[in-house]
DNA sequence: CTGTTAGCGCATTCAG
DNA sequence: CTGAATGCGCTAACAG
């Protein structure tokens, strides 16, 4: 920067001011400075800037497995929205493991992100989150909720899942199974309770044997399907708690030679871009993923400027997408 | 940090040295410092550190549409590998647009990333890349190649695509169409030329009408299929240049009521995690995506430490995954 | 083994 | 409208 100043025949402070338009500068001088910048190929050092301003214009994003279509759409939305406000994203994969998550949180905090968006792991409440609140880092939670007095944004899970059960019941199913997500996640719990509510409303019996855990992952979900099918009185319909488990369930059913929806009907939480291309097309609950991302950065930027605003929880409405895996007839 | 020093009864330089283990310190003193750090909840300011060391321990990743399964697996691999070396990722979406890409490149360079991994857009050679080389930012290209004297890592496209054509020809197809990717990307060009090579080897005629551009996107690919089917002498098999276009092609075929592979056989570049679940299961060329990411950060870290090493181009071998969309019989 | 000190590149008072 | 000087928090000589 001093090079630029010298070449333009001004002081560094003037260069700083033209760069930030932070005080009136002679238009002619401005031009000279810009010329100097161009001929020198100068690029402002945001690191030094951050040091004095104590603001990096960057946000941390702690998330698990970007490979999950749900999360990567979220990342996409957040990156785009953050960019609109001149913020850059620092990315960290928590591996959905509390310890690893803490490492990521530390790393991003050391880099002095202005705020953090995090999809908390099951153990976040005892590791990562306390660290953040103790450090006073503006934080918003996405997808999963934690009673930690933080801003959070996600979807309404209970009613949505209950509606799924209701729909399956309308198709005449009496024994409906559920493959649930990893324990410790609010989404898993809410969807299971939605499942039970749905059963109750439809006047169906609760059978603990019909509730199996797929730990939010592909392979475990496949195994869960096998267990379900091996039951003396197996379900004729299954509800699946998240997108990854749907893959496993589909494979499990295929490998067992069961026809969907003929032998077993399926309805799943989380839509896929290709949900209409599998056979049969999947009936799902689609989350407004992009919207979640947008709201998350909005909330975060708000909190950065108003640290004392009361924490807010936003629940967006997911949407039931009827296709054929539930037993509905093809359109047209 | 001075707070820590005071509480521990030592100087800041000692604190710095215990933090970095950069010179022998009395074990007892070390303990006192660590205690102070803990009770104060001190978190080192990497920004200040970066300023003096002129190294941020962060890498920039410029990529388009994280939503693409290929790219998000790449991001996943790169994030993981970078993390293993203590580096954090700054993420930027180029939107595959040269101008936007330049903005992203600038933003990340201003944040003084130690190096940059970039999937260059079609116009990168005239905007983003010159900026990077002029600024002396260690850079490695992924997926697409550009003759810019930079390290780059991707797959062998030509032979792989030719093999796809060969396979389709073995199934008896004489008219094989191709839906190609966006112009200006090396991958698009290489795959088209592989297509032609394959035709030649199989002794089939080249028909320009059978080559339609799907611009690497879903909708355009669907339109491309329509155009192909409307031909007086439509193809009985189609090769698709990338994953997103496969979605479009599948929809186009379905909407036209064509059966795959009965009416039209399909073979596509890029595998999906769910390629076995669509009907029929997709025959694809699977890239060693994870490996590409790993090699990219290896190359980048190498270049950061050895700026004058000769640029290297790594071509990894993709793998032909035979399923049923090409006309192969189901296994078993 | 430990303390003192001089910048890293910039934003920002305070004087002109 | 402009320049000189201070310090952001830390590392790395340089002394002791």
Image (spheres, coloured by chain):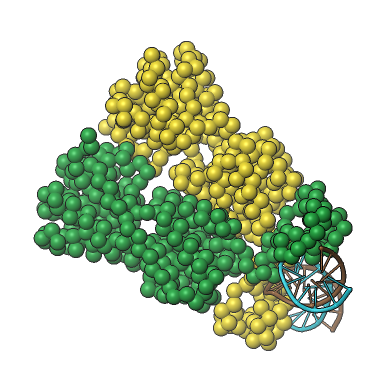
Chain colours: A green, B yellow, C cyan, D brown
Q: Position of residue A209 (x, y in %)?
A: 17, 60
Seen in the image, is A272 located left or right of residue A254?
Answer: right
The quadrant the N terminus of chain A occupies is bottom right
The residue positioned 40% from the left and 49% from the top of the image is A69
The foreground one among A28 and A121 is A28
- Is there any visible trace of residue A96 in the rendered image? yes
Whether residue B315 is visible here, answered yes or no, is no
Q: Residue at x 22, y 48 (%)?
A: A266
The residue nearer to you, when weighing A8 against A159, is A8
**Residue A106: percent from left, percent from top:** 54, 68
- Which residue is painted at 31% across and 22% down in the image? B263
How many numbered callouts? 0
Say if A244 sits above or below B165 in the image.
Answer: below
Question: For residue A274, what is the image quadrant?
Answer: top left
**Residue at 50% across, 67% down:** A302
Residue A45 appears left or right of A245 = right
Along the line of sight, the residue nearer the viewer: A247 or A33: A33
Q: Which quadrant would the C terminus of chain A be assigned to in this image?
A: top left
Locate residue A87, reporting x and y percent. Answer: 58, 59
Q: Position of residue B119 (x, y in %)?
A: 58, 42
Image vertical order of residue B206 relative to residue B123, above or below: above
């Amino acid at each position: 920067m001093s090079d630029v100043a010298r070449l333009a025949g001004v002081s560094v402070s003037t260069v700083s001011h033209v760069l930030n338009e932070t005080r009136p500068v002679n238009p002619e001088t401005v031009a000279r400075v810009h010329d100097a910048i161009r001929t020198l190929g100068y690029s402002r050092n945001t690191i030094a800037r951050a040091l004095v301003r104590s603001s990096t214009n960057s946000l941390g994003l702690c998330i698990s497995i970007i490979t999950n279509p749900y999360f990567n759409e979220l990342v996409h939305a957040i990156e785009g929205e953050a960019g609109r406000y001149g913020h850059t994203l620092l990315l960290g994969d928590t591996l959905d493991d509390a310890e690893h998550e803490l490492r990521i949180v530390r790393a991003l905090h050391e880099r002095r992100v202005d705020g953090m968006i995090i999809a908390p792991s099951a153990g976040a409440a005892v590791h990562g989150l306390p660290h953040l609140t103790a450090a006073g880092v503006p934080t918003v939670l996405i997808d999963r909720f934690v009673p930690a007095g933080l801003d959070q944004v996600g979807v309404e899970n209970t009613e949505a899942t209950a509606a799924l059960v209701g729909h399956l019941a309308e198709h005449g199913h009496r024994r409906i199974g559920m493959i649930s997500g990893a324990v410790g996640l609010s989404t898993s719990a809410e969807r299971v309770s939605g499942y039970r509510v749905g059963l109750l409303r439809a006047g169906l019996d609760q059978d603990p044997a019909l509730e199996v855990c797929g730990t939010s992952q592909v392979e475990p979900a496949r195994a869960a399907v096998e267990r379900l099918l091996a039951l003396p009185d197996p379900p004729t319909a299954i509800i699946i708690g998240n997108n990854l488990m749907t893959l496993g369930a589909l494979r499990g059913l295929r490998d067992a030679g069961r026809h969907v929806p003929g032998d077993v009907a399926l309805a799943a939480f989380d839509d896929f871009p290709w949900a209409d291309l599998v056979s049969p097309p999947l009936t799902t609950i689609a989350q407004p993923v992009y919207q979640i991302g947008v709201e998350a950065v909005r909330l975060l930027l708000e909190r950065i400027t108003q640290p004392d605003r009361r924490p807010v929880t936003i629940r967006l409405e997911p949407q039931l997408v009827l296709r054929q895996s539930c037993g509905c007839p093809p359109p047209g």
